[in-house]
Amino acid sequence: MNFIDSHCHLHDSRILDDIPGIVARAEAAGVKTMVTCATMEENFEQTAQLSLAYPAILPCFGIHPWFLDSLSPDWKKNLEQYLVSYPSGVGETGLDFMIQTPDRDRQMAVFEYHLMLAREMGRPVNIHIRKAWDAFVRILKRLGKFKAPGLIHSYSGSGDLIPVFEAHNLYISFSGSVTRPGAKKAVKALKAVSRERYVLETDTPDIYPSLPEPDPHRLNEPKNLAAIARIASERAGFEFKTFSDQAYQNSLDLFSPLLERKKAGQ
Ligand SMILES: [Zn+2]
């Protein structure tokens, strides 16, 4: 069975020394591609280097809403330069209203700039939304349907909103949070997504899934995708292989233009 990890952070200092092992274990577990997201300018270069070193690693460049204080005066130019230089998606970017600072207006301005770039460049966008669903829907309604598709990572919204996101050309990504015993809302959302609109992710090294035999260090890695898919499919009442194959196909729909460019060395 094949998998694509649609959202992870392989640049993270907790796991960076172990990347050769992580990539080898992912490959052995059928993970064909890992979409690794930078989170601030400081880790753009590390993310780019990982994608140069490994055919299975596809980069995204963006500023996570938690790290807006790290922005340099040249951040827009810097971001654009990385996007132009590598076959890459935009992200991680988004809105997080669980936190008070950076304030909402600033988060929205930076997020909208990312969306504008994604639109102009025809790139997929890897989106983080927490407790900001109304603001996000307002932005979507104003900007209209995405040209290249995007994904909402580790979806925590309600099932009712999913048709709105699908109509804007967004995919819904599920992480190890669906494996938690109390994850009723996420399982309900998974059931509400159209067959051709869900994808899977680990958010490595975070969101360690609830596994029967967890690793002692509890740092997540892409090899856990199969276990996440198995538990998610069981909980939502889907057949494991059919569910996993469809998730793989859906991720290809999102990322295959970039994967083809990467393969061609463009
Ligand atoms: Zn993330």
Image (cartoon, grey):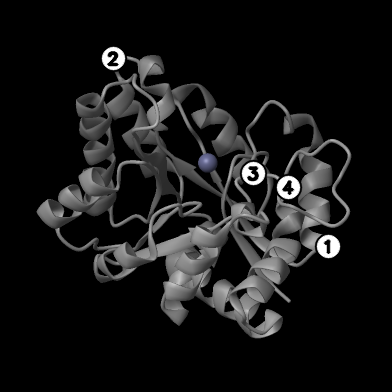
| Residue 156 versus residue 259 in the image, above or below | above
* Residue at the image point whose x is 71% and y is 53% from the top: 222
Q: Quadrant of residue 113?
A: top left
- Residue type, numbered disc 1: Ala
Which of pointers 1 and 4 lies earlier in the amino acid sequence? 1
- Residue type, numbered disc 2: Pro
Q: Closer to us: mark 1 or mark 4?
A: 4
In three-dimensional space, the C-alpha distance between marks 2 and 4, rounded to whole angstroms, equals 34 Å
Which of pointers 2 and 3 lies earlier in the amino acid sequence? 2
Q: Closer to us: mark 2 or mark 4?
A: 4
Disc number at residue 28? 1
Q: Quadrant of residue 10?
A: top right
Residue for badge 2: 73
* Residue at the image point whose x is 69% and y is 80% from the top: 240
- Residue type, numbered disc 4: Glu
* Residue at the image point whose x is 51% and y is 52% from the top: 154
Say whether residue 105 is left or right of residue 68: left
